[in-house]
């Protein structure tokens, strides 16, 4: 995922540099603190991961986790970065070895954040 923003004050536009889709999304305000979410982006990430993710099974059988690298420039609002990371964490996979044998859900991606 590579958000970009312009000096005109427009919000980041998440897009995938690794697959063929580009998804322009509108932020959804959450609560009274100015927080936002990108539910359309989260749905698209789940769809892409379900179809193309390399590591989707139970963590006990496949210990690797798919990697997402989020690149931004220094002018990207932090609230946008957090909302995109939350969207990336939406896909879940089973982990029956994480809680003493009790099966729990964990994010399908490990996210690395990079600023230019």
Image (tube, helix red, strand yellow):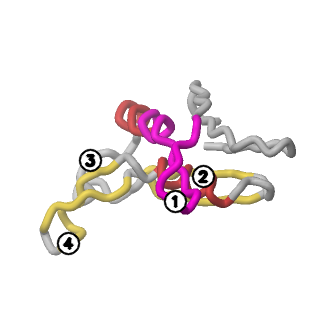
Report the front residue among 78 and 73. Answer: 78
SS label for mark 4:
strand
The local crowd at label 1, few if under 14, some if 14 to 19, many if 20 or more residues have their Cα within 10 Å, is few
Q: Specify the label residue 106 is tagged with.
A: none
Q: Which sits earlier in the primary sequence, circle 1 or circle 2?
A: 1
Which-is-in-front pick, marks 1 and 2?
A: 1
Asked if 33 appears above or below 68 in the picture, the reply is below
Which-is-in-front pick, marks 3 and 4?
A: 4
Label 4 to label 1, Cα distance in Å?
A: 34 Å
Q: Which residue is mark 4?
A: 99
Q: Which residue is mark 3?
A: 57
Q: Which sits earlier in the primary sequence, circle 4 or circle 1?
A: 1
Among the 4 quarters of the image, the one containing residue 115: bottom right
SS label for mark 1:
loop
**Residue 4 in the image, given as x and y percentages of width and height:** 74, 43
SS label for mark 2:
strand
SS label for mark 3:
loop
Residue stretch rendered in magenta on the structure: 26-44
Q: Which residue is mark 2?
A: 69
In this view, which residue lies farthest toward the bottom?
Answer: 100
Asked if 60 appears above or below 17 in the picture, the reply is below
Q: Is residue 114 left or right of residue 47?
A: right
Which-is-in-front pick, marks 3 and 1?
A: 1
């Amino acid at each position: 995922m590579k958000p970009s923003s312009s000096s005109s004050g427009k919000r980041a536009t998440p897009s995938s540099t690794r697959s063929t889709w580009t998804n322009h999304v509108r932020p959804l305000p959450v609560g009274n603190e100015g927080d936002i979410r990108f539910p359309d982006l989260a749905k698209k990430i789940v769809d892409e991961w379900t179809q193309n993710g390399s590591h989707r099974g139970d963590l006990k059988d496949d210990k690797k986790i798919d990697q997402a690298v989020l690149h931004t420039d220094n002018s990207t609002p932090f609230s946008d970065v957090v909302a995109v990371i939350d969207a990336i964490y939406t896909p879940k996979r089973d982990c029956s070895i994480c809680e003493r044998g009790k099966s729990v859900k964990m994010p399908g991606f490990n996210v690395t954040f990079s600023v230019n």
